């Protein structure tokens, strides 16, 4: 067991853990987008509320297990990412500073830590707006009504869209590096993975962006 912990704490192990937790989070984002797009149905939130009630049900044990695992993976992903970034920074040292960074890494890889920071700040605000009040509190309105109120606020929606742009940049590099860390780097697959990652990241974040845009320009979705 100690050997396993030594491995995941090694440079290679941390990259593999980053890849696996990152791919799990991506799967969650796909499911989360599918659920959130129910907000756009012209039914005053009826189907979305049914979906929300199902996901929040106390007897929905599989969802609770995935939910706990997701929080753990997000925290581990963040901590591991910071450790990798700091380790790489220390390892490069002064020699990296006197060279052109673009010769050593791609724009997306250099942007990871800062994009991840913005996304983390957004995640905290997003959880404070939706998850904690509607899952752990006792709000006076429904989650659909809360979503209408939040996304009808231009400040919140603009920040939401800006965070999605940062998320798209983060996903572009993360998607590629995840498969690379898992050893999938054959020449005939590299271009496919890279291009798919770019298209996937743009479409995913564009899908999320549709929601605030819809409520901003459709008078609260009613």
Image: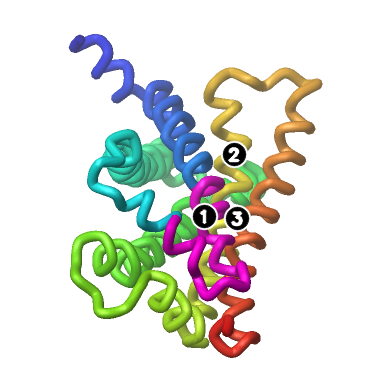
Left or right of 203 in this view: 55? left
Q: Quadrant of the C terminus?
A: bottom right
| Numbered disc total | 3
Label 2 to label 3: alpha-carbon separation: 10 Å
Quarter assignment of residue 18: top left
Location of residue 131 with respect to 57 vertically, above or below? below
Query: Which circle's residue, 2 or 3, is located before the other in the chain?
Result: 3
Select label 2 or label 1 by which is in front: 1
Left or right of 9 in this view: 183? right
Q: Position of residue 135 (x, y in %)?
A: 26, 60
Q: Position of residue 147 (x, y in %)?
A: 44, 74
Tell me the magenta residue range.
29-50
Label 2 to label 1: alpha-carbon separation: 22 Å
Label 1 to label 3: alpha-carbon separation: 23 Å
The residue where tag 3 is placed is 169
Residue 30 within the magenta-colored segment of the rendering: yes
Local packing at callout 2 (Cα closer than 10 Å; few below 14, some 14-19, many 20+) is many
Which residue is rendered at x = 19% and y = 12% of the image? 2
The residue where tag 1 is placed is 35
Which residue is rendered at x = 60% and y = 55% of the image? 169
Q: Quadrant of the N terminus?
A: top left
Left or right of 5 in this view: 107? right
Query: Which circle's residue, 2 or 1, is located before the other in the chain?
Result: 1
Residue 32: in sight, yes or no?
A: yes
Query: Which circle's residue, 1 or 3, is located before the other in the chain?
Result: 1
Residue 90: in sight, yes or no?
A: no
The residue where tag 2 is placed is 175
């Amino acid at each position: 067991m100690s050997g396993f912990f030594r491995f995941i704490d090694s440079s290679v192990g941390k990259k593999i853990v980053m890849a696996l937790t990152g791919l799990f989070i991506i799967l969650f984002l796909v499911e989360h987008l599918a659920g959130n797009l129910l907000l756009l149905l012209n039914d005053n939130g009826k189907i979305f509320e049914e979906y929300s009630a199902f996901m929040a049900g106390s007897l929905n044990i599989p969802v609770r297990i995935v939910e706990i695992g997701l929080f753990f993976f997000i925290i581990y992903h963040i901590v591991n990412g910071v450790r990798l970034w700091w380790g790489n920074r220390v390892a490069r040292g002064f020699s990296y500073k006197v060279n052109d960074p673009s010769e050593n890494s791609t724009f997306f890889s250099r942007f990871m830590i800062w994009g991840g920071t913005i996304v983390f700040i957004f995640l905290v605000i997003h959880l404070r707006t939706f998850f904690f009040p509607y899952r752990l509190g006792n709000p006076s309105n429904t989650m659909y009504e809360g979503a209408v109120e939040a996304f009808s606020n231009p400040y919140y929606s603009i920040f939401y869209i800006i965070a999605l742009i940062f998320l798209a940049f983060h996903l572009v590099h993360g998607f590629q590096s995840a498969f690379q860390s898992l050893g999938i780097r054959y020449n005939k697959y590299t271009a496919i993975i890279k291009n798919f990652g770019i298209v996937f990241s743009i479409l995913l974040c564009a899908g999320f962006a549709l929601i605030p845009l819809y409520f901003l320009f459709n008078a609260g979705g009613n």
